[in-house]
Amino acid sequence: MIMAGNAQKIRSFVGLTVAFAVLCGSGVFAQIEGVSPLSDYMYKRDFARYEAIKKEANAQNRCDQLLAFIKERAISRILLYAVNDYQACVKPEIDKKNWPKVISMQESLNALLPTEQKVKAEKIPVGSDEYIQGQLRPSKLMIQKTLLAAYLGSNNLPKAAETGENVYSLSGDKTMVPVLADVYFRMENFDKYLTYAQKLLDATPIDKSYPTALQMADVYLKKQQPEKAMGLLAKVMNIYGDKVPPGYEVAGWNATRTLYYGSVASEAYGKKDYNKAMSAFGKVTQFDPKNDEAHYYIGMCKWQNKDQQGAIESFAKSVVLNKQYAGKARTYLEQLYKAEHSDSLDGLDEELTKARGSLGIN
């Protein structure tokens, strides 16, 4: 009798065990067949398990259990709570700038979150996919932003670009535009850089976006597209041509102004617009007083305008600077000087001494 009773109990226990396994599936938190994962019943089950995990004293164990919960119950009304708590596990690693660990943890979490395909495969009730995706969208976005920071921190620019594109696609967040522009610039992917830099330029007044415009101009020069470069510089010079913009040293800004006005002057000279060329070359000498090329071409412009004495003074400056244009400048200087002084060079040395004095040359 006793043995028969024990056998009955064993059979009953085995039966219950099998039934439990069938109900729960292969995972501890698996969905019960026929019961919506978003039902009140599953909510209570999931919440009880979630509360038990929160009581785990060991931080690493708690994080591991949260990740296991998310893996088994990726479609759940508790999912967002578990995700947020797992993100709290990541924060200490962010604070320590332990970027490899941050990347590993965030990628593990991201891989477990439900996708549209997973939601459809689970055959959960109509509308649940919108519920899941809507609830998780902020979390997915935060994961991507954290990954972006980690990839930038570890100087993994290709992954930073890919992740930044994901963030921009998910959110349309305009703060991603300068980030992506900077990443692509550092990668020397100049076509992508120009795409995002132009977005930034279009959305911001030039008096605020001038650093981007100047950087774009430099890129266009590297790409041998001087027309586009000068077009951007012209916009900046309309505001900052006569003053130094915030954040720039005088010497560096003078070099930029010299480049721009030199280009304007050369174009005007090529078109025989000598007055415009002379004015622009004058700007060059304002910002780079010892620019022998500018003094030489000012002399040429004055000569064309029948201002021989003015041309002599400009050629003399180019000569005493003793650089690239000194030889040609001396030829024209002597030719003009003789024409003005009865075919004599007497007194030319005094002209050269005066040029040295005006330029601060001993």
Image: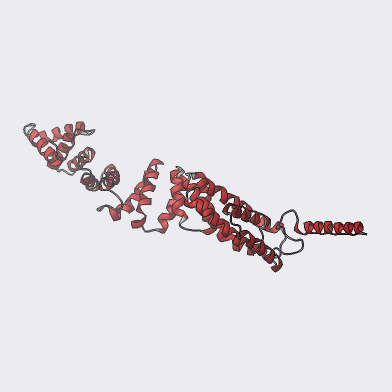
Query: Relative to residue 182, is residue 46 drawn left or right?
Result: right
**Res. 231 in view:** no
Query: Relative to residue 156, is residue 6 drawn left or right?
Result: right
Q: Quadrant of residue 54?
A: bottom right
**Res. 172 in view:** yes
User: Compared with residue 339, is residue 126 higher up or lower down, i.e. above or below?
Assistant: below
In front of the other: 88 or 144: 88
Where's the C terminus, which quadrant? top left
Query: Relative to residue 221, is residue 83 drawn left or right?
Result: right
In front of the other: 290 or 113: 113
Task: Residue at 91% x, 59% y: name it.
Answer: 2
Looking at this view, name the residue that lies furthest to the bottom.
40
Percent of width and height locating residue 106: 56, 51
Percent of width and height locating residue 180: 47, 50
Where's the N terminus, which quadrant? bottom right
Q: Quadrant of residue 52?
A: bottom right
User: Compared with residue 224, is residue 232 higher up or lower down, i.e. above or below?
Assistant: below
Percent of width and height locating residue 232: 36, 50
Snapshot colouring: secondary structure
